[in-house]
Amino acid sequence: MTSPRDRMVASAALLIRERGAQSTAIADVLAHSGAPRGSAYHYFPGGRAQLLCEAIDYVANFVAARMAQAGSGIEALDGLARFYRKNLLETDYRAGCPVLAVAIESGEPGAANPVLERAAATFTRWNDLIAQRLTADGIATERAEELAVTLTAALEGAIVLARATRDIKPLDIVHRQLRDLLEAEQDI
């Protein structure tokens, strides 16, 4: 069984993916997780910022584990696209990426902002994992790094478009185009 703390972190991630960071209050997280009211201050003495950072870490680890299971870059892409497609459809297009949500809503870049820094570190981590997978597939390191950024940016953008239009087509198109790109890179 998971602890109230773990449930709160998972609940924060789930709520942020659907509502955004600004619209997710600690009271919402407590209600969603079923955690006792005083537990927020006990488990997260750093307040809302600490909870957001830990929710980002939770998502970062979840997605990284999915990527690690893939046997190739194409398998990683297919797995991520399937995962996001399923989430969009099952939530009636409410589920986006919580990391993107906090990155957009976390305030001014440049100022000391632990939430934005955590989001940036997560995207860097995911790009590095994708690049490592593509390098293992035989793609040159510099090219693999470029493709990793392209993959992350395109998938995140496709999720936003799918949510906004309430249509899965943008994600399906981006998935197909990225798959073609990776297949062409491996044929070189």
Image (cartoon, grey):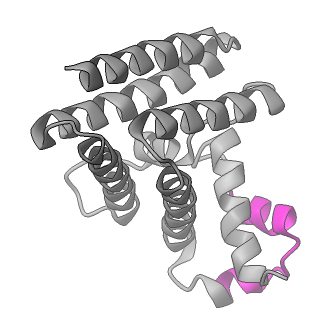
Give me the residue at 45% from left, 24% from top.
157
Q: Is residue 62 magenta?
A: no
Dividing the picture into quadrants, the one containing residue 37 is bottom right
Q: Main secondary structure of the magenta part?
A: helix
Name the foreground residue: 162 vs 127. Answer: 127
**Residue 161 screen position, x and y as percent:** 55, 16
Name the quadrant of the C terminus.
top left
**Residue 60 screen position, x and y as percent:** 49, 58
Give me the residue at 34% from left, 24% from top.
182
Give me the residue at 58% from left, 14% from top.
172
Name the foreground residue: 9 vs 36. Answer: 9
Q: Is residue 33 magenta?
A: yes
Dividing the picture into quadrants, the one containing residue 131 is top left
Total label count? 0
**Residue 3 screen position, x and y as percent:** 77, 84
**Residue 130 screen position, x and y as percent:** 35, 45
Q: Which residues are magenta?
A: 24-41
Name the foreground residue: 106 vs 54. Answer: 54
Name the foreground residue: 16 vs 67. Answer: 67
- For residue 138, above or below residue 66: above
